[in-house]
Image (tube, helix red, strand yellow):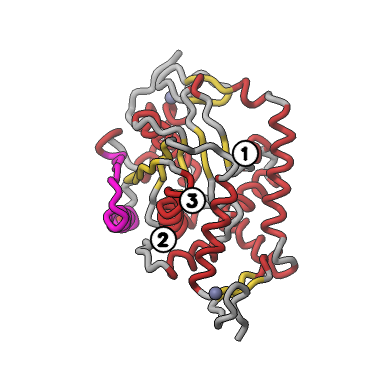
Amino acid sequence: MAKCIVCGREAVVKIEHANASFCAEHFKQYYERKILRVLKGLNLENKCILVALSGGKDSVSLLYALNRLKKDLNYNLKVLHIQLGIGLYSKESLEVSKQLAEKLNLRLIIFDLEKNLGWTIPEAVKVTKKKPCSLCGIVKRWVMNKVALEENCEYVATGHNVDDIDAIALKAMLTYRPEDIERTSSPILEPNMEVNLVGKLRPQFYLTEKENMLYAQFNGLPIVETTCPLASRSKIFKYKGIWQEIDKVNPVGKINFAKTLVEISKKLKENKREVQQLRKCVRCGMPTYGRDVCAFCKINEKVSGVERHN
Ligand code: SF4
Ligand code: ZN
Ligand code: ZN
C-alpha cells in the first residue's frame, strides 16, 4: 500500500491527477487548501457568503469546508436550502440539509417553491415543456440571487465541481453556446449591484466529484442517498461519461481543461460585451442577459397562468 506523501503513514486514497496518496487527515488538509487557494484572491473580510445546500455530496462538503475556513478568511456564512418539490428526493434533501445545519450550528434558510411561488419544479416542467435541469437551473439561480440580496450577502457559493464545469463547457462547445462557457468558466464572479447581481463563488472549481465524496465520507457528513428522478433526462450526464473516457487517457485532463477555460474567460472579459448586455428584468428587478423579461419571470408567468404581453 502506498504511503501518505505528507506523514508517511499508510495512505487510504490516491489522487491520480495530483499524483499523490494521502491518509484521511492529510487528504482533508489538501482538500481545504485547494478551496483556500481559490478564495485567497478575494477580500472576504466581513463579507457574507450564502451557501446553497442541496444535501448532495458537493454542497455538503462545500458547507463543511467553508465553515472550517471561516476563521482564516473572516467571512460570515448563511445557508440556503431550496425546496424544489421533487418527491422523495426533495424530502430527503431537506432532512440532510437540516441535519448538517444543526451539526454546524448554522441557521438554515428554507425557500419552498410551492409556498413562495405556488408551484414546484415537476409542475413547471409539465406546463412549460422545458428540459427539467435547464428549468431547475434558471429557478435556482433566481432564488439564490433573490435570497442573497434579501440577506445582504455579497456572494452565493455553489457546489460546482470540476466534473460539472468540464461537462457544461464541453456541452456548450459542442452545441455552440459560447455564452454558457463564459458564465461557467470562472471560480469567482464579482457582484454587479447595478443590475442586482450578487457575486458567485465556485470554491470546488478544481476539485473532482470523487474528492468531494471522500471529503464528505472522511468527515462523517450526512448525504442524500436518493438521486433526483428528473436527472436522467439531462444530457449533462452523458457528457460526464465522455469525460470518464478522457480521464483514462489523461488523468490530469479534467483539471487542465478547467484551467484553460479560466484563461480563455479572462481574455473574453477584457472585452466587456456580455457584461454590458446585463440589465434588470422589468418584472422582478433581477439581472437578465439581453432581454427585458428574465427567463425566470417567463416561466413563473406561464406556470402561474398569468401570461402578460408587453
Ligand atoms: Fe434540478 Fe436537474 Fe438537479 Fe433534479 S437533477 S435537482 S431537476 S438540476
Ligand atoms: Zn498523512
Ligand atoms: Zn424577472
Q: Residue furthest left?
A: 115
In the image: residue 7, left or right of residue 231: right
Q: Is residue 257 above or below residue 274?
A: below
The three-letter amino acid code for the residue at tag 3 is Gly
Q: Name the foreground residue: 286 vs 239.
A: 286
Residue 112: within the magenta? yes
Ligand 3 quadrant assignment: top left
Q: Provide the residue span drawn in magenta.
A: 88-114
The three-letter amino acid code for the residue at tag 2 is Thr
How many residues crowd around disc 3 within 10 Å: few (fewer than 14), some, or many (20 or more)? Answer: many
Say which of marks 1 and 3 sits in front. 3
> Residue 219: horizontal and vertical position, in percent?
41, 67
Identify the residue at horizontal 37%, vertical 56% (top origin): 55
Q: Which residue is mark 1?
A: 180
Quarter of the rendering occupied by the N terminus: bottom right
Q: Name the foreground residue: 170 vs 160.
A: 160
Identify the residue at horizontal 52%, vertical 63% (top origin): 29
Question: Majority secondary structure of the magenta segment?
Answer: helix
What mark, if any, has residue 227 been given in the picture? 2
> Residue 222: horizontal and vertical position, in percent?
35, 64
Tell me how far mark 1 sits from mark 3, CA to CA.
17 Å
Q: Which residue is mark 3?
A: 159
Choose the circle earlier in sequence order: 3 or 2.
Answer: 3
